[in-house]
Amino acid sequence: MADLQATARAHTNIALIKYWGKKDKNLILPMNGSISLTLDKFYTDTTVEYSPSLKKDHFFLNGQNKNDQKLAKFMDIVRQKTGFNSYASINSINHVPTAAGLASSASAYAALSLAATTAANKHYTKTELSRLARRGSGSATRSIFGGFVEWIEGQDDESSYAKPLRVNTDWDIRMIAIVVDSKPKKVSSRSGMQTVVATSPFYKGWVSTANKDLNDIKEALSKNDFQSFGQIAENNSLKMHALNLSATPHFNYFEPESLIAMRVVENLREKKVNCYYTMDAGPNVKVICKNNDLNVILDELCHYFPSDHLLVAAPGPGVKLLDN
Ligand code: DP6
């Protein structure tokens, strides 16, 4: 008999080579492979408790009852895969500093995948969990693993999953999340990438160069070459944002402060401080640097942003079960 209840923790990840477009919307198969870093600072804890008496799933986020169609659909996939047919009560707590605006579906679906399968008494491998988490949100496929992670594009449900990248760098990497704005996104990643695939005249160029970027960044990682690593990540991020500007209707995630943050990083580079930036589907800028350079960069950023809007993260672990 299943234990009926389990709690799991998963951390968010930030893509260095971005996923921005699907070739299969139902299975969430990406147009290109991607690479990310899982972060220690931001995570989601999720408890799933199945109860034969429930007539539907109930979802609470930070204690508040939510009606979430994406999540209900995902739980149907879990039931189909595990063969365990009860509805569940799902309690998620996002451990993201208040107003950071960094809450992500990546940590949410990674934690839910482990908690929902374990509560159904199924013990999936991390590869199986990665395939399952992908069905909730593409970026969640990578949050199953810690550190640097590659999502292998694949051609079908079986072949599209993430794996950890074994790297031997001596960088002691850090990411500074600059919190620019905490309002809800104007355009969700799901609909933004869909508009881009359907309308950007540059999309073909994105796919072919994203695959090259992926191979080049892996080479930079294997050669311990931080400068190339950072430059490739920064260029890849800007290319993604350029797609958004070239879509119909066009959209973008930049706020004036995002552009200021980018300029500060570029100016620091001119002063020979090794730092680079990346941005996802929101206005917050993440600065990629080595721990050694952290204080110099923070000192400079403090002239432009309140210090409590500068959140420093290090590489974080993969998904794990917590004691109930
Ligand atoms: C810009 O994983 O949120 O963060 O699969 O539609 O749920 P869905 O999208 P999502 O998109 C993430 C986009 C990104 C880049 C990335 O994480 O690779």
Image (spheres, rainbow, N blue to C red):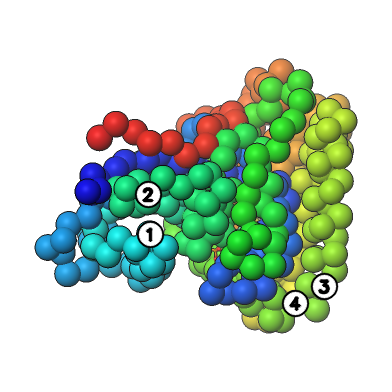
Q: Which sits earlier in the primary sequence, circle 4 or circle 2?
A: 2
Residue type at tag 4: Ser
The residue located at (64%, 68%) in the rendering is: 156
- From the image, tell me which residue sits under label 2: 122
- From the image, tell me which residue sits under label 4: 200
Q: Is residue 48 visible from the viewing direction of this image? A: yes
Which dot, 4 or 1, sits closer to the camera? Answer: 1
- Callout 2 crowding tier (Cα within 10 Å): few <14, some 14–19, many ≥20: some
Residue type at tag 1: Thr
The residue located at (80%, 66%) in the rendering is: 207
Instruction: Say if 227 sits above or below 240 in the image.
Output: above
Q: Which mark is residue 204?
A: 3
Instruction: Say if 174 sits above or below 209 in the image.
Output: above
Q: Is residue 278 left or right of residue 267?
A: left
Q: Which sits earlier in the primary sequence, circle 2 or circle 1?
A: 1
User: Where is residue 135 drawn, in percent x and y?
Assistant: 50, 63
Mark 2 residue's CB less than 8 Å from ligand 1:
no
Is 127 or 234 nearer to us in this picture?
A: 127
State the CA–CA distance, disc 4 to disc 1.
Answer: 39 Å
State the CA–CA distance, disc 4 to disc 2.
Answer: 42 Å
Give the SS element for disc 4: loop
- From the image, tell me which residue sits under label 1: 82
**Quarter of the image holding residue 184?**
bottom left
Residue type at tag 2: Lys
